[in-house]
Amino acid sequence: MTVVKLHHTEFGLLDLTPPSKEALQPMPERIAAELRGLGLLESVVTMAKTWGREVCAMTGNTTLITAVEGFELRIDVMETIRKSLLFNDPHLAVSLHRGRNRSVGNIENVCVLYNTQHPGCAVADALVSLVLLGEANWPENATPHTLGDFALAAQIEQRARRLKLGLIVLSLEDLEEINDIRKALELGIPQAAVDMLCCFCRRCYTCKGMEIEAVKRYTAPLFNEIPREAIESYALNPSIPSDVLFLPDFATTP
């Protein structure tokens, strides 16, 4: 029986030529299942809002990419399918790029495993699941723990977008600080949240060159989440006297 070695797919050329004697000869049924799975993956990625594509100039194959501040997650689709079919390798070909300049930042291969307890499923289905996790903003109970750093950065970024901080350009440090402010509120220590928020306001004023009124206007949604009495209490004894300049007017009005 002649088995086709090259398959043109939505994500590039799937080359199933055995590179060594250890390579398997995949059954046509398995190959067909993966090709169907790639068709589904193409449909999902086309509708996705958080994933992009990058075509390799050398191979013409497509890499899937999703990014947040300081991180970039990449899926090598063809390599994942090839290793699964030729070597029964359960690992998805996923890499994490760290650093704002990703051409010189750290790159690490991330261990993400395909669940082999369901042999009837194609590994392409696992790629679909991974893309959908990204679309759902990496829920903690479903995201592989090896993607924890990326998932946390994505969740922090989403929280910041929900705060609608207007024209303030938020760095990863800012996003982490905003996350800490919300955690303080969740833990029932609102005065600590006020202290941290005032620290954030000072940085907007000194490092971002914003006027005091602009800082107050764009951080108002954050102050609105803090109990009024906690803000008034902080105004009476601020960590730094100038903090009162950034507090809502009701806290400083006699």
Image (cartoon, rainbow, N blue to C red):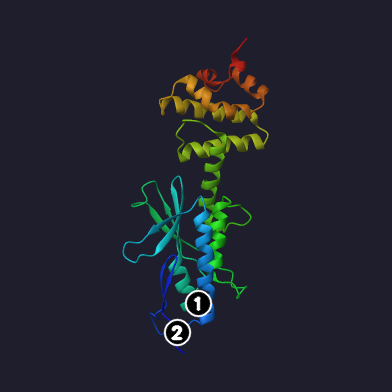
Can you tell which mark lies on residue 49? Answer: none
Q: Quick check: 17 left or right of 81?
A: left
- Residue 199 point in image, percent of width and height: 51, 28
Q: Is residue 71 above or below residue 233?
A: below
Q: Quick check: 53 left or right of 115?
A: left
Callout 2 amino acid? Val
The part of the image, by quadrant, that contains residue 4 is bottom left
Mark 2 neighbour class, 10 Å CA radius: few under 14, some 14 to 19, many 20 or more: few
Q: Which residue is mark 1?
A: 31
- Residue 88 point in image, percent of width and height: 51, 76
Q: Is residue 134 above or below residue 218?
A: below
Q: Secondary structure at mark 1?
A: helix
Mark 1 neighbour class, 10 Å CA radius: few under 14, some 14 to 19, many 20 or more: some
- What is the count of numbered marks? 2
- Residue 54 point in image, percent of width and height: 39, 57
Callout 1 amino acid? Ile
Q: Is residue 140 above or below residue 159?
A: below
Tell me the residue at 41%/28% (across/down).
208
- Residue 61 point in image, percent of width and height: 39, 65
Residue 233 or residue 22, whichever sits in front? 22
Screen quadrant of the C terminus: top right
Residue 200 or residue 17, whichever sits in front? 17
Q: Which residue is mark 2?
A: 3
**Lower sequence index among marks 1 and 2:** 2
Q: Are marks 1 and 2 in contact (CB under 8 Å)?
A: yes
